[in-house]
Image: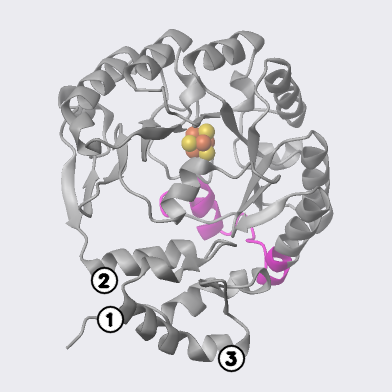
Amino acid sequence: MAGIYLHVPFCRSKCAYCDFYSVAGDRFMEPYAAAVAKEWEARRRELGNHIVSTIYFGGGTPSALPLHLLAGIAELFPKDNVAEFTIEVNPDDVSAEAVAAWRRMGVNRVSMGVQSLLDGELRAVGRRHSAAQAIAAVEMLKQGGISNISCDLIYGLPGQTLQSWEYSLHHLLDTGITHLSAYALSYEEGTRLTRMLDKGELEPASEELSCAMYDTLCRLSSRAGMRHYEISNFSLPGMESRHNSSYWDGATPYLGLGPGAHSLDCHGVRRLVPPGLSKYIAQPEAAAIVDVETELDRLNDLLFVALRTARGLTLATLPEARRAELMSLAAPALRAGHLVCADGRLAIPEEHWLISDAVIRDLLFEEDD
Ligand code: SF4
């Protein structure tokens, strides 16, 4: 099984916290769409004979692309066996017409950046939409026949309190969404928010507040019937993201198209499309090999992603000698209760996910001397 990721590098404006590669304006949209078609033709063989089972249009803001261009790109890809086709959207792009067009393209899952349901918090980080638009967008998606709806929220926003976080969570979960991704705000280099932080114009959330917000997130999503299946992801039973779960299971290949997209083939070869729209349009097939994974890299990457999920790591996926080595490295964490081993899987219990980095670091394999 294989996945296709398309990076759509356009946003109507830049949010204050975001360091993803994207550009404003629609001047390059047509040439971008033509470049994607060329890149697909040049690189589709990287998928070998694997059947494409998931497609993910991310960004940037895929919903900023005109519908006819999006539809043209979607037509490129084989969809006979696609179980999940996700598009990331912004609430202000959701309309009855857009939902109908996305469905005609084969989209069956929408991931929407909501971030907060308080207008003051949204304005503080430069989001274009309002809370009311986000709620109306969920309704429009449902009315238009898209029932698999994931929303993103951010905690630790400037000025956000535990009460306001609880308000956003409550009201969003009440809309009947099927999936929630929630991330702590991070201050990335080069963003407007980080410049404000450096100038002392805002205060970051304290660690204590962030932990309390994370606890509230776990409690309210569980009360809404959601399963906490990955450190930042919650879903109703059976509505986990298939595309992202494949990454977390270490499944290959996946093909990343568009400027800034990463790929990993079945032989451990990682490729990166250089970010930069003009360069991409001039030479869309310029994805370059950035790494050839050794077995050790692959196993360590797998530890990092699998141990942040509720399923944990399936020990049978490791060679026998590595399994024994891992269990010996894991012994102290098992004794401390930071890891559990059951049914052939090693997992970090949910209450210790906030210290998962430290737990995983002690398990990483090292080169034999
Ligand atoms: S819309 Fe999304 S990708 Fe675009 S700037 Fe905002 S957070 Fe970044």
Q: Which residue is mark 1?
A: 366
Quadrant assignment, res 40: top left
The foreground one among 19 and 254 is: 254
- Kind of residue indicated by mark 1: Glu
Residue 89 sits above or below residue 163 on the image: above
Task: Please state the total of marks drawn on the protein image.
Answer: 3
Magenta-drawn stretch contains 220: no
Q: Does residue 41 appear left or right of residue 121 in this picture?
A: left
Q: Does residue 125 appear left or right of residue 80 in this picture?
A: right
Instruction: Report the magenta residues as a range.
Output: 189-211
Residue 191 visible? The answer is: no
Residue 32 sits above or below residue 177 on the image: above
Quadrant assignment, res 56: top left
Disc 2, disc 1: CB below 8 Å? yes
Q: Which residue is mark 3?
A: 335
Q: Residues within 10 Å of mark 2 (few under 14, many from 20)?
A: some
Residue located at (60% from left, 45% from top): 240
Task: Give the x, y percent position of residue 202.
Answer: 63, 56
Callout 1: SS: loop
Residue 22 sits above or below residue 27 on the image: below
Residue 296: numbered disc:
2
Q: Does residue 168 appear left or right of residue 318 in this picture?
A: right
Sequence-wise, the earlier of marks 3 and 2 is 2
**Ligand 1 within 8 angstroms of badge 2 C-beta:** no
Residue located at (70% from left, 38% from top): 178
Magenta-drawn stretch contains 199: yes
